[in-house]
Image: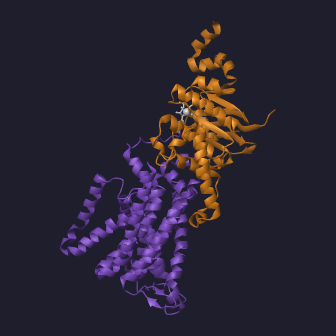
Amino acid sequence: MADALLEVTRVTKVFGGLTAVHAVDLEILAGEIRGLIGPNGAGKTTLFNCITGVYKPDGGEIRLEGSRLNGFKPHRITKAGIARTFQQIRLFGEMTSLENVEVGLDAQHRAGAISAILHLRRHRIENEEASREGLNLLRFVGIERYANEPSRNLSYGDQRRLEIARALGTKPKLLLLDEPAAGMNPKEKEDLMALIRKIRDSGVTVLLIEHDMRVVMGVCERVAVLDHGEKIAEGPPEQLQKDPRVIEAYLGREVAEDAAGA
Amino acid sequence: MKRGDSRNRRLLTGGLLTGVAIIALVIPQLVSLAAQEILVLIATFALLALGLNVVVGFAGLLDLGYIAFYATGAYAWGIFSGAGPIKMPYTRSEFWGDWGFWIILFVVLAINMGIGVMLGSPTLRLRGDYLAIVTLGFGEIVRIVANNLESVTGAALGISQIPHPRIPFIGYHFGLNPVPYYYLLLLLLIVGIFVIRRLDHSRIGRAWIAIREDEVAAEAMGVPTLKMKLLAFAIGATTAGVAGVVFASKSNYVSPASFDVFASFLVLCAVVLGGMGSIPGSLAGAFVIVGIPSFLQLRFPELDEYRYWTFGVILVAMMIFRPQGLIPSKRREAELMLEADPDIPEAVT
Ligand SMILES: Nc1ncnc2c1ncn2[C@@H]1O[C@H](COP(=O)(O)OP(=O)(O)OP(=O)(O)O)[C@@H](O)[C@H]1O
Ligand SMILES: [Mg+2]
C-alpha cells in the first residue's frame, strides 16, 4: 500500500472519568485531504491536541513518516512537520499579520541571539527571508493588504486565513485545520475550499475537522467519523452519508432506523 | 497609514532622540552635586527598567523579585573586590585595583546569567500568577540570605569600604564624584539599548511577543517557549547585575536593606508606567518614578513626607489618563484602542 504520512495507532486520551478519545486509529496518506467529522464533543479537537503534543496521549502511538512523535514537545512536533490552526482563533493579536506569519516561518530559522545582536549574515538572510516569504504566504491566502495591520483588527474570516498562513509558515508536511469554516459566510467558504485544494496542490497533506458538510463533501476524498471518542466509520463522504452508524451518531437511533426502513 | 506620515514621524523621533541624547550628555555639567546624585539614581533605575522590560514587557513574564539580580551584582563586586568578610587572594592595591571592577562587570554577566537560568528552569514552566508568586519568594530569599549569611555578606551590617572603580592605564579614580558613574551608566544604557533593540527586531523578539500574546499558539508555531523565556530572564538578570555592580562601587557600601520588595515594585512601576514592551517608555518611566519625586524632594525638602503621596498621584493619574504608558510600544497602542478581549478558556480548542 501507499506510504502513510501520519499513522495514529490506538490513541487514547482520558480526562478524569471521561474518555475523550478512545483507541483511535487513523492513517493519512501523503497528498490527500482527509476529513474528520463527528458530533460536538466527539473528541476531534482532543485528537488534534494529542497529535500536536498539546496533550500527552494516555495510550497509543503517533508516527510521522515512520518516526514516533509521542512525548515530543509541541514545538518539536511542529518542526517535525505538523502544523495546525485552532478552533478558537489564537493569533498573536498585537502583532501585525506579517509578524504572525514570520513567527511561523521562524520555526525554520536558526540565527541565535549573538547573530541577531551583531547582525551577522545568517540573521540578515533569515530576517529578510521571513518578511519576503511572509508576504508571499499572506498573498497565497489572499490577505496581503492587511500585512501591517495588527491581527486582532482583521475580520473573522481573514483571521482564519491568517492562522492558515501562519501554520503554513512552519513548512509543514501535514496541516491540521480545526473547523476553518466556522463563522464564515458562503462566499468565504467557497474561497476557503479553493484555498484548501491549493494547499494540497502545493504538496501539503491536509487533515480537516469541519462541521459544514458542504465543505467536507467539496474537498475531502475520504472522511473519518468520530463519535464519543471512537472512530465509527471511514470512507468516501457519499458513502458515509448513507451509513446507518453515522446517521445514528448525528441524529439518534430512531431516525437511523427509520432511514434504514424507508 | 500614508508613507509621508511615517517618514515625518521618523524624523520627529530622530530629532527628539538627538535632543534627549544631548541633554543627557551635558546635564551633569549644569547642575548641583545633589542633582548629580539624582541623575545617577535615575540612570541606575533606567538600566534596571530596561532589563525588566525584556522580562515583563516583551516576554510577558511577571517577575516580582527582579531586584534580587541587582543584589547579586552588587554583592558580587562587594565580595570579589575583597571588601567583604571573605579574604581574597589579592589585595586592592595590586593590579586588581585597576582592572578588578571591569573584570567583575563582565563576570557578573556570567554569574547572573547562571543564576537566572537556575532560577528560571523550574519556575518558567509556571504561568501567570504562579510565576509572580515564585519570583516574589525568590526576591525575598536572596535578601534574607544576604541578611543572615554573615561569613559571606556581612549580614545586616552589609559590606562597606567597597572600592570605587579606576580606569586602567590613565589611573583615573572614580571616587565619590557622581559624574563619572553617571557617564558609565549612560554608556551601559547605550549598550543595553543597542543589544535589546536588535533582539527585539529579530526572531527572538518575535518569539517573546508571541509568547506574551499566546503561549500555546507560540509553542504550536515552533517557538521553543521555555528556552526563549529563559533567554528573556537571563537578559533581565544580567542587566540588573551590571546595574548592581555600579551601584555597589558608587555607594561604597551594600546591605540587604537596599533590596527589599519595594525596590522590585518600583522598577516594575517604571516599566508599566513607561509602557510595557517599549524601550524609550522604560527609560521615561524610570525618570518619572525616581526622578520626579527626588527632584521635588530636593527643591522642596519640607514636603518630604509627601514623597509617596506624589508617587501615588502619578500612578493614579497615569492609570486614568494614559493606561498604555508614557511611550507605549506601537503594538500596545493598537491593543488598547480596542476593547479587551475575553479570556481564553483553559482548555485548548
Ligand atoms: N482540557 C479538557 N479537560 C477536560 N475535558 C476536556 C478537555 N478538553 C476536552 N474535553 C472533553 O472531551 C470531549 C471531547 O472534546 P473535543 O473538544 O475534543 O470535542 P470536539 O469533537 O472537538 O467537539 P466540537 O465539535 O464541539 O469542537 C468533550 O466532552 C470535552 O468536554
Ligand atoms: Mg473541536
The residue shown at (37%, 69%) is B19
Name the spot of residue A231 as percent of width and height, x first. Answer: 66, 28
Name the spot of residue B27 as percent of width and height, x first. Answer: 34, 77
Please tell me in which quadrant of the rendered image residue A180 appears: top right
Q: Say if A170 sits above or below B105 in the image.
A: above
Chain A colour as displayed:
orange
Outermost residue, front side: B4
Chain B colour as displayed:
purple
Outermost residue, bottom side: B93
Outermost residue, right side: A1
Quadrant housing the C terminus of chain A: top right
The answer to whether residue B13 is seen in the rendering is yes
Name the spot of residue A127 as percent of width and height, x first. Answer: 59, 56
Q: Quadrant of ligand 2?
A: top right
The residue shown at (22%, 74%) is B299
The answer to whether A170 appears left or right of B190 in the picture is right
Q: Say if A130 sits above or below B17 in the image.
A: above
